[in-house]
Image (spheres, grey):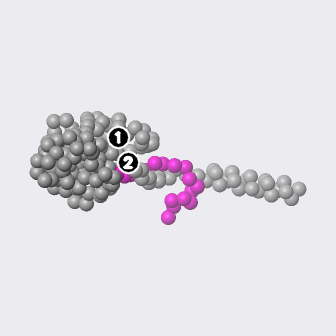
Amino acid sequence: MYIYRAYLAIFTSGLLFLSACDEVPFNFVLNLDDTYEYDISDDGVISEEVTVSRERVVEDLEIDSETTVEDVNVESLAIKIMDLNGNQASAVRLAGLFYPQLGANPIALFEDLELAATADGDFTAITDLESAGVNALADKLLGYINDTDFNDFIVTVEGVSVPDGSRVEAQVAIKLRATVKFSETVEAPFFVGQE
């Protein structure tokens, strides 16, 4: 009899606990990562581009279609250059440009970045980012996620070899890390999130 009452008390407490749930908004952060890759084969002058579609950006994001994303921040850009057979340049001096859509004027992401070509090609953080370009890229990503922008964008690398005119045979990659901030309403016990 005592065991029956104990089970009844636990069962009743569980029902009361579950019935005391409330819908509470919770804030979430997701990482958005992408890498833009460029094959460079030029005699001293570099100009290569990658076109990025909305589908490429949102395909792996697991966000409910009814959720409104509040903010996207570009946390970092990193770059690497891998030396390929036939390369005569000791380094490259590059600028990264962002075109919000095809035919638009470019906005600098970074400028005057000199990198030595190496065999292993480790990523190096780009520390001198241009805020106008980074903010424009973040706005573009936000538009993609919130279904308000559907136009492709372009990220280019442009520059010269060091020493000037030397043959460049290399692969360049730019790695993007952005964070997506959003809130969703979830069911939680009434005391969760209460002050």
The percent position of residue 12, horizontal first and vertical second, equals 73, 53
Quarter where residue 124 is shown: bottom left
Q: Secondary structure at mark 2?
A: strand
Query: Does residue 102 appear in this view?
Result: yes
Q: Nearer the viewer, residue 180 or 119?
A: 119
Does the image show residue 99? Answer: no
Residue 55 among those drawn in magenta: no
Left or right: 12 in relation to 103: right
Residue 112 point in image, percent of width and height: 16, 55
User: Separation of disc 2 and disc 1 at Cα?
Assistant: 8 Å
Amino acid on which disc 1 is placed: Val
Q: Nearer the viewer, residue 93 or 161?
A: 161
> Which mark, by number, is residue 57?
1
- The numbered mark at residue 32 is 2
Instruction: Tell me where the magenta segment starts and ends, as one range.
Output: 176-195
- The residue lying furthest to the left in this view is 164
Q: Within 10 Å of the Cα at label 2, are there few (<14), some (14-19), or many (20+) other Cα atoms? A: some
Residue 178 belongs to magenta span: yes
